[in-house]
Amino acid sequence: MSDNCYLKSLVASGWNTNDSVLEALAEAGVPQPTEDYLAGAFRQDTWSKLDRVCKLMSANFAECKFADSVHYGALLVTSPNLFDVRPKLQEYVRSDQTEIVVPDFVDERLGEGVNNADLDSPWTLFATVVSDAGLAMGSYNDVVSAHQGVYSIDGVDTRRLMTRQLWCSLVLQNLVSPDSELRARWTSTLFVGEGLVDGKVASGTVLHGQVRQRLGKPTRGSSPMRVRPAVRIAAAKA
C-alpha cells in the first residue's frame, strides 16, 4: 500500500463519514481528521513509518491462524482529555452507526482502562489490525506467556497496545462493525494490554447490535478469540 493510501483510508473512515460521530468530535473540541488536517498534522515520513511497520507486522504474523484474512492499517485514537472512547458512549454518538442499535455495555469492573494516546494531542496514530477480525493466537494466558520476540515489532511489544482504547476507536473508525456476527464469522478481541481484572480478561465484541466490553476466562482460546497487535506511530501536532 502506498503511503498516501493510509491517509485516504482515514479520510474515508467513520471519523469523517458518520455525522453523529462528527458531532461528538466537534462538541469535544477534536479537529475533524480531513485530508488537509492529516497532511498538516503529521510529517510526511510518518506515513512511510506506518507503511513499514504494517509490512513488518504482516510478515511477522504471516503464519498465524487467519493471517490471510487480516489487514493492517492506520488507526486514529483521540486524546481521552477531549473525547474518551473507552466508557459507555452516549447513544447519539452511535446513531449513524446503523449496525449498532442497542446502548453500549461496559462491565463496571473494568474501570477507566489503559491509555495509549498522547494526552496533549487531539489524535494519535497507530499501526494495527483494522480488518473485521484479528489473529487467533490462543487464550490470554497463551499470549502473555509467549516469548516477547513473538510479538515484538520494531522494538515494541505489540501486546502492550492490545487495549480497550484502540478497539473502541476501531469500532468508531470502521464503516462496518468489527468482531460482529454480521461479518464472515463472529469474533471477539482480547484486551491483553489491560491485564486481568478480578482474574478475568477483558474483551470486546459487537453482538446483536450492541458494543460489548466484557470479562471472561483467561484460559479460553477458541478460534473466535482474537488479538490485534499494534504499534504507536506518532501524535498529531497539537
Image: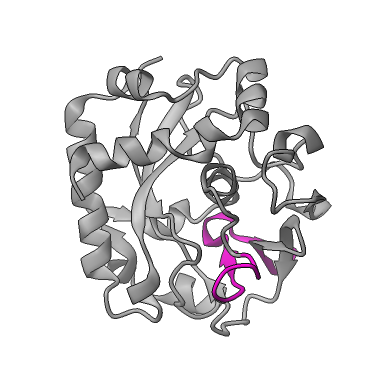
Picture coordinates of residue 213, whole percent (x, y): 71, 57
Between 96 and 24, the residue placed more toward the observer is 96
Picture coordinates of residue 218, whole percent (x, y): 63, 75
Name the image quarter holding the C terminus: top left
In percent of the image, x 71 and y 71: which residue is there? 216
Residue 40 visible: yes
Vertical order, 224 against 128 (above or below): below
Indicate whether residue 192 is drawn in magenta.
Answer: yes
In percent of the image, x 47 and y 70: which residue is there? 144
Left/right placement of residue 11 relative to residue 112 reads left
In percent of the image, x 57 and y 76: which residue is there? 185
In the image, the segment drawn in magenta is: 180-202
Between 139 and 43, the residue placed more toward the observer is 43
Between 18 and 162, the residue placed more toward the observer is 18
Picture coordinates of residue 165, whole percent (x, y): 57, 45
Left/right placement of residue 101 relative to residue 156 reads right
